[in-house]
Amino acid sequence: MKILTGQEQFLKVRASAIAGLIQADLVTDIEAVSGEDRYLRLDMNGLSLVQGKMELRGDFGQMHRRVLGGHLQHEKLLRAVRWKGMPDDPIAVDATAGLGEDSFILAAAGFHVIMCEYNPVIGALLADALERAQNGSSLSRSGGANDLTGLRGQETNFVGRHSDSFETEQIESRIREIANRMELFTGNGIDILASLEKRPDLIYLDPMFPAKQKSGISTKKLQLFQKLETPCEAEEELLRAAFEARPQRIVVKRPIKGKPLAGRRPGYAIECRNVRYDCYLL
């Protein structure tokens, strides 16, 4: 795979570092990727995976609507991962992080989240999104700031009647606060679970499966994502590693009519419109 970047020195330096991590070739001429099936592009908006007219980029800035203005409490995932008697600073491991959207929701709910992503390209996209969020540039670079212009002086469902009081800086601050509770490990989630230094309170699993739709990713982008993230072929090993890490709870995201992961029945399940959260209590 190739990484296309601009002539700016800081972009070249960053692109070179990414290329070294994922063993990609760095190019600065767009003609060098004209014949490529897909390639990475690093510009002022961040790191993107490009194929034809499709583009996939990790972007926590676009998730501000889901965590502000009381919207977070409506996230179905939180019905499965919260319980009475939780510690004040719970630790969660998202062993199949993808682009980190569910991890972001967990962090917004107060978890310290350890994200695991085995695919190096997806890991690079996730690392770039996390860095932009932690640096407070996720809105200004992603184009999300443009989405805020309509929030001032208008009624909107985003934060109710007080939406015009939220400035871009305040939203960036909230995104940065959430992102600072997230850390990324690139590698096999099974191995990472086995090497944890501290016992987690929650392990969250959302393994890829055929026809799965990652939340927040459009159908066309899903096609691009699925070319990198293959369906889970080690279900038993993944679930066993989760149990051996001895968390208080394991939550597995499944299709609404799908079989339990590795055929192991959960203690109970929370069903939503299109997905089901299988909950295992230890």
Image (tube, grey):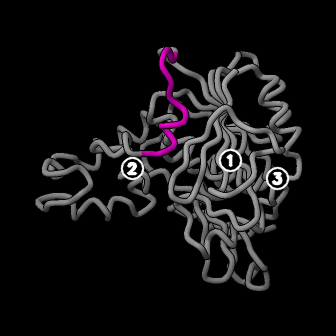
Residue 130 on the magenta segment: no
**Residue at image mark 2:** 66
Per the model, the C-alpha gap separating discs 3 and 1 is: 10 Å
**Residue at image mark 3:** 232
Query: Which comes before the other along the chain, label 1 or label 2?
Result: 2
- The residue shown at (61%, 66%) is 56
Residues at discs 3 and 2 in contact (Cβ within 8 Å): no
- Classed neighbour count for the residue bearing mark 2: other residues with Cα under 10 Å, few (<14), some (14–19), many (≥20): some
Query: Closer to the camera: disc 3 or disc 2?
Result: 3
Report x, y in % for residue 101. Answer: 55, 49
Per the model, the C-alpha gap separating discs 1 and 2 is: 19 Å
Report x, y in % for residue 52. Answer: 66, 83
Query: Closer to the camera: disc 1 or disc 2?
Result: 1
- The residue shown at (38%, 42%) is 72
**Image quadrant in which the N terminus is located:** bottom right
Viewer can see residue 16: no
Report x, y in % for residue 29. Answer: 69, 77
Answer above or below: position of 121 versus 116.
below
Answer above or below: position of 60 versus 135.
below
In the image, what residue type sits under mark 2? Arg
In the image, what residue type sits under mark 3? Cys
Residue 206 numbered mark, or none: 1
- The residue shown at (19%, 51%) is 160
Viewer can see residue 91: yes
Q: How many circles with numbers are drawn on the protein?
A: 3
Along the line of sight, the residue nearer the viewer: 167 or 251: 251
- Classed neighbour count for the residue bearing mark 3: other residues with Cα under 10 Å, few (<14), some (14–19), many (≥20): some
Relative horizontal placement of residue 253, taking residue 217 as reference (left or right):
right
Q: Which residues are magenta?
A: 75-86
Report x, y in % for residue 162. Answer: 14, 47
